[in-house]
Image (tube, rainbow, N blue to C red):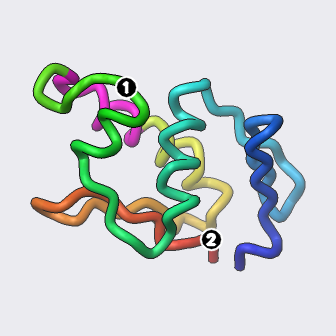
C-alpha cells in the first residue's frame, strides 16, 4: 500500500511503513524515482539509460542492470520479500507499487 510508504524526491529518500529509511545512492534514487513516478507503466531500458546515466544504453554496458539489482536488494527486505520492480522481457522495467 503506497500510503504506508514515504517517497520524498526533495530529500531523495524512501521510508518504509516501519519508518526505516532505505539508503540509496544518487543514481539509485534517480532510477527508482523514474520508475516510481511512472508506476504501472513500462519504462524502456533505453529511456532509463538516457535519463539516469545520461548516455545511450549501448554505451552504458551493464550499469543499468547493476543499478536496478542494487535497488531491488535494498528494497526487498522492507517490502515483505515482494519484488517492487519487475523486468519486462524485451521491453524494460515497471514499478508495480508498494504492497
Across and down, in percent, residue 59 comes to: 15, 20
Q: In this view, does 3 lie above or below 21?
A: below
Q: In this view, does 49 lie above or below 32?
A: above
| Rendered-image quadrant of the C terminus | bottom right
- Looking at this rendering, what residue extends furthest in the right direction? 19
Tag shown at residue 53: 1
Check contact, mark 1 vs mark 2: CB within 8 A. no
Q: Is residue 41 above or below residue 52?
A: below
Residue at mark 1 to residue at mark 2: CA–CA distance: 25 Å
Q: Give the range drawn in magenta.
A: 60-69
Tag shown at residue 98: 2
Q: In which quarter of the image is residue 53?
A: top left
Image point (40%, 36%), residue name: 51
Across and down, in percent, residue 43 comes to: 33, 58
Main SS, magenta region, reads helix
Q: Quadrant of residue 21?
A: top right
Across and down, in percent, residue 83 comes to: 46, 64
Q: Is residue 10 magenta?
A: no
Amino acid at each position: 500500500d503506497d500510503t504506508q510508504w514515504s517517497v520524498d524526491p526533495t530529500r531523495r529518500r524512501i521510508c518504509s511503513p516501519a519508518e526505516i529509511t532505505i539508503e540509496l545512492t544518487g543514481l539509485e534514487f534517480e532510477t527508482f524515482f523514474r520508475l516510481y513516478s511512472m508506476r504501472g507503466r513500462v519504462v524502456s531500458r533505453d529511456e532509463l539509460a538516457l535519463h539516469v546515466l545520461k548516455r545511450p544504453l549501448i554505451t552504458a554496458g551493464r550499469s543499468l542492470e547493476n543499478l536496478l539489482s542494487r535497488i531491488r536488494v535494498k528494497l526487498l527486505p522492507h517490502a515483505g520479500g515482494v519484488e517492487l520492480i519487475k523486468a519486462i522481457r524485451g521491453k524494460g522495467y515497471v514499478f508495480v507499487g508498494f504492497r
